[in-house]
Image (spheres, rainbow, N blue to C red):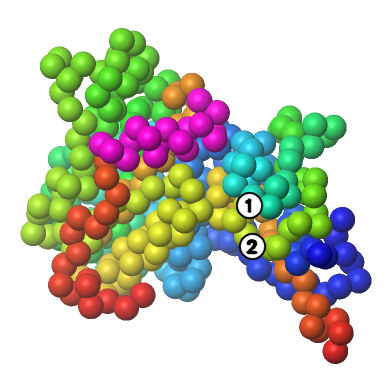
Amino acid sequence: MPAKGYIEVNELFCKACEICVTDCPFDVLALDMERLTPKGYHPAYMVNPDACTGCGICATVCPDAAITVYRYDRKKAEA
Amino acid sequence: MVLTDTPAKLVYERPEALGTTVTHYCPGCTHGVAHRLVAEVLEEMSEVGNTIGVASVGCSVFAYNYFDFDFVEAAHGRAPAMATGIKRVLPDKTVFTYQGDGDLASIGMGEIVGAASRGELITVVFINNANYGMTGGQMAPTTLPGQKTTSSPTGRDVKRQGYPIQTAELLSTLEGSAYIVRRSLHNSREIRRAKKAIRTAFEVQKKGLGFALVELLSTCPTNWHLTPVEARDWIEERMMPVFPLGDYKISSAVADLKV
């Protein structure tokens, strides 16, 4: 099934607390161990983007309001 | 991979009222969640330009740097007294205090009891994380029986150091308080309930129904010596039996309020 949405992580704010990684019901997120944020944390990223539904639970639990959530509008694309 | 050829609509973004400053809070600290909920609620109520916040002393001492609206800093524990003065001089403004447990339940207990008993038309956001976070995790009035802190290294002994103060229950007995509830910030469901409670607390002030306080159980991963995820389980397993979530005072006028 194609992804229903996606998220963007603002790496200025992300502190790698892993709460979004744990709480994502579809295991979409992980910490990117290859990269560092300006503050020296490994930022969260979408390791499994096809499973994202754009539910927004990650943004609800994020303590640093680093996550922006989008949902695809496929009906509009087909019309 | 993000599909660039499919149109997408924005579902959620960081509230503008939160500003663009990176907080000094430790990774996973739910102070950030509480800040965000306050900012979201004020944006939804279109009150951002009409709000004056009062910061306390503690980890939340820099709250005035993180909100993009007017803020003042009170002396330790005296935020409710300062908010009282601001609200009485400027009754049309939305005035709230943002206080931790070391500030509100310890040195500021007199001020908060006074403000609640007078039924001051202010909103209080009270963060309870069971220790003094800013100074290194010492025992606070809200520390749980048996909890190890830097100043109770063998655990809080209730025979010597007493029992935790349950602020919401205590303030709910006062006639002037209109809305006193306790919520938690340990999972997405409780965060949504907490947001609704904060919204109600601000509506109570706007309608002039009385004193409103929302107590939020919050994590302190650094001083609890737990990971952010373990700290959230600790709230559920250890804190919630001592500090049960619930509505402790909802006056009849508030019960009729539609949010």
Q: Tell me the chief SS of the magenta region.
A: helix
Q: Which mark is residue B255?
A: none
> Which amino acid is tagged 2?
Cys
**Which residue is the site of mark 2?**
A55
Q: Is residue A37 left or right of residue A55?
A: right
Indicate which disc residue A25 carries. Answer: 1
Q: Quadrant of residue B120?
A: bottom left
- Residue shown at 74% from the left, 37% from the top: A31
Q: What's the distance in space between the residues labelled 1 and 2, CA to CA?
A: 9 Å
In which quadrant will I find the C terminus of chain B?
Answer: bottom left
Question: In this picture, which residue range is highlighted in magenta?
Answer: B226-242
**What crowding class fits label 1: few (fewer than 14 Cα within 10 Å), some (14-19), or many (20 or more)?**
some
Foreground residue among A41 and B69 = A41
In the depicted structure, whether residue B133 falls above or below residue A73? above
Q: Is residue B212 above or below residue B141?
A: below
Residue drawn at the location 55% of the way across and 28% of the way down: B227
Query: Which of the chains bears the disc numbered 2?
Result: A
Quarter of the rendering occupied by the N terminus of chain B: bottom right
- Towards the viewer: B22 or A43: A43
The chain ID associated with circle 1 is A
Point 18% across, 74% down: residue:
B253
Q: Magenta includes B233? A: yes
In the image, A34 versus B241, the foreground residue is B241
Residue under disc 1 on the same chain as residue under disc 2 = yes
Residue B135 is left or right of residue B19, and the answer is left
Residue A58 drawn at (x, y percent):
62, 52
